[in-house]
Image (cartoon, rainbow, N blue to C red):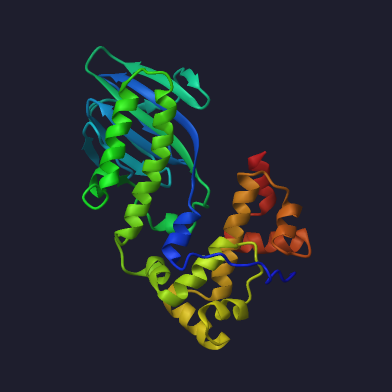
Amino acid sequence: MHDRSSKPDVTSGDPLNDMLRGLRLDGVDYWRCKLSAPWGFSFPAQQAARFHFVAEQGCWLRQPDGEWVALSVGDAVLLPRGAAHALASAPDVPTETFGQQRCTPICGDIFDFRSGGDGASAVLFCCSLHFNLDGLHPLLRMMPDVMRATELIAREPAVLHLLEAMGCEVAMERVGAAGIAARMADVLAATIIRSWVEGGCGSANGWIAAVRNPDVGRVLAAIHLNPDRDWTVAALAGIMGASRSSFADRFAAIVGETPARYVAQVRMHQARQWIQRDRARISDVARRLGYDSEAAFSRAFKRVIGTAPSHLRGQAG
């Protein structure tokens, strides 16, 4: 492979900050929902994240593990990996798949959705959001299936202000309110994730411990910021300021796998993003990652991802 080691690494000095700087949410679809009891909708598993905000009248959430939990007015939940779940006016209400009914466009990717009976009306703001990172990125893999904003308010006061502002925008019928709420949803979802990371991510072990390590963290941040660079053990050891052998041993001990394997995973997950999300040609991806042939890239891709890039390219098409 070609060496692009002259490419500069622009890091802030804080590995966690660098990881979060690379995390972005791109809005796909937004629904302002007015649902009159009895109502119930299931949300099948998907690659995009799901976000729900309760503006008026509480409801119930069936979590991916099957447990029903009550949501109150002002509650917001993020399902970062789009796990299957359901929302309903009560746990015993039958559910139907969300999206089968007709939605009224408001503007762009924002829709108005109304359904249900003649009971109390709930107003929800629901989003389907795409992360710019691959779903198998270590940060996304570590996240719980469901993240509730209300659980973060104690250590993240900004969350409460965002929730209150979203409640006002979703409930009002003012011109542009849905668009403003959509942008707030992006910010709120990113804030939930940031607060979760800064709060310890629920674990002191594994990948997050590696990121927090002063030496290894710098190496991980550099890899994720420049996944298309042809990283060598020598180049990574130089970031840590260690010899190749001592770096490799320390990296494997803290991260749990060799530097070469970790780099390969990050690069192939990025390649999958380019192929599926951006619909890039396989030959262009192979060249961008420095492979001399499309065949060599395809073999490396299949070893890591488990399927040929041509299969994913066909799905994207």
Q: Residue 54: x percent and y percent?
A: 28, 31
Residue at image coords 51%, 87%: 246
Asked if residue 152 lies left or right of residue 26, the reply is left
Quarter of the image with the N terminus is bottom right
Number of marks in the rendered image: 0
Q: Residue 294: x percent and y percent?
A: 76, 58
Asked if residue 229 lies left or right of residue 197, the reply is right
**Residue 256 makes an appearance in the image:** no
Residue at image coords 31%, 38%: 162
Is the residue 165 above or below the residue 33 in the image?
A: below
User: Which one is in front, 89 or 191?
Assistant: 191
Residue at image coords 50%, 66%: 221
**Residue 183 makes an appearance in the image:** yes
In this view, the residue farthest toward the right is: 293
Is the residue 203 above or below the residue 64 in the image?
A: below
User: Which one is in front, 233 or 311?
Assistant: 233
User: Which one is in front, 204 or 67?
Assistant: 204
In this view, the residue farthest toward the top is: 118
Q: Quadrant of residue 3?
A: bottom right
Residue at image coords 31%, 64%: 203
Is the residue 249 above or below the residue 26 in the image?
A: below
Is the residue 122 above or below the residue 303 in the image?
A: above
Q: Residue 263: x percent and y percent?
A: 57, 68
Quarter of the image with the C terminus is top right
Q: Residue 59: x percent and y percent?
A: 24, 29
Q: Quadrant of residue 245?
A: bottom right
